[in-house]
Image: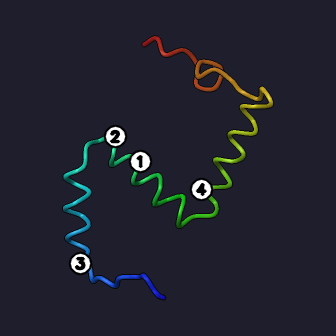
Amino acid sequence: MDTRIKMEIDTKEIINAVKKMTKEDRDAFIEDLLASTSPEYLNSIREARADYKAGRVAEHKELFGSSDV
């Protein structure tokens, strides 16, 4: 038995729904969207997590210098 429901959703409806989301929900939605459509994005996350777990991390100051202006 096929339990799928087909719906047509207009792009404007999606945009309006995203605009109504809280910033936290919107950020999570965009991350999920990127993850589901971009193998490169998923690979970059896997690599970053592996680097972090292996201790290959650097402080912001090391990479970008002092934030003192």
Identify which amino acid the numbered label 4 is placed on: Tyr
Q: From what the image shows, is residue 42 above or below residue 56? A: below
Which of marks 3 and 1 precedes in the sequence?
Answer: 3
Q: Are marks 1 and 2 in contact (CB under 8 Å)?
A: yes
Which of marks 2 and 4 precedes in the sequence?
Answer: 2
Report the residue at 41% width, 47% height from top.
28
Report the residue at 69% width, 39% height from top.
49
Identify which amino acid the numbered label 1 is placed on: Ala
Which of marks 2 and 3 precedes in the sequence?
Answer: 3
Q: From what the image shows, is residue 30 above or below residue 37? A: above
Circle 3 SS class:
loop
Circle 4 SS class:
helix
Between the C-alphas of marks 1 and 2, the distance is 6 Å
Between the C-alphas of marks 3 and 4, the distance is 26 Å
Q: Residues within 10 Å of mark 3 (few under 14, many from 20)?
A: few
Image spot of residue 58 (x, y percent):
69, 24
Q: Are marks 3 and 2 in contact (CB under 8 Å)?
A: no
Circle 2 SS class:
helix
Image spot of residue 16 (x, y percent):
19, 62
Between the C-alphas of marks 3 and 2, the distance is 24 Å
Q: Which residue is mark 4?
A: 41
Identify which amino acid the numbered label 2 is placed on: Glu
Q: Which residue is mark 3?
A: 10
Between the C-alphas of marks 4 and 1, the distance is 14 Å
Of residue 31 and residue 5, the one placed in the foreground of this image is: 5
Which of marks 4 and 3 precedes in the sequence?
Answer: 3
Q: From what the image shows, is residue 6 above or below residue 66? A: below
Q: Which residue is mark 2?
A: 24
Identify which amino acid the numbered label 3 is placed on: Asp
Q: Residues within 10 Å of mark 1 (few under 14, many from 20)?
A: few
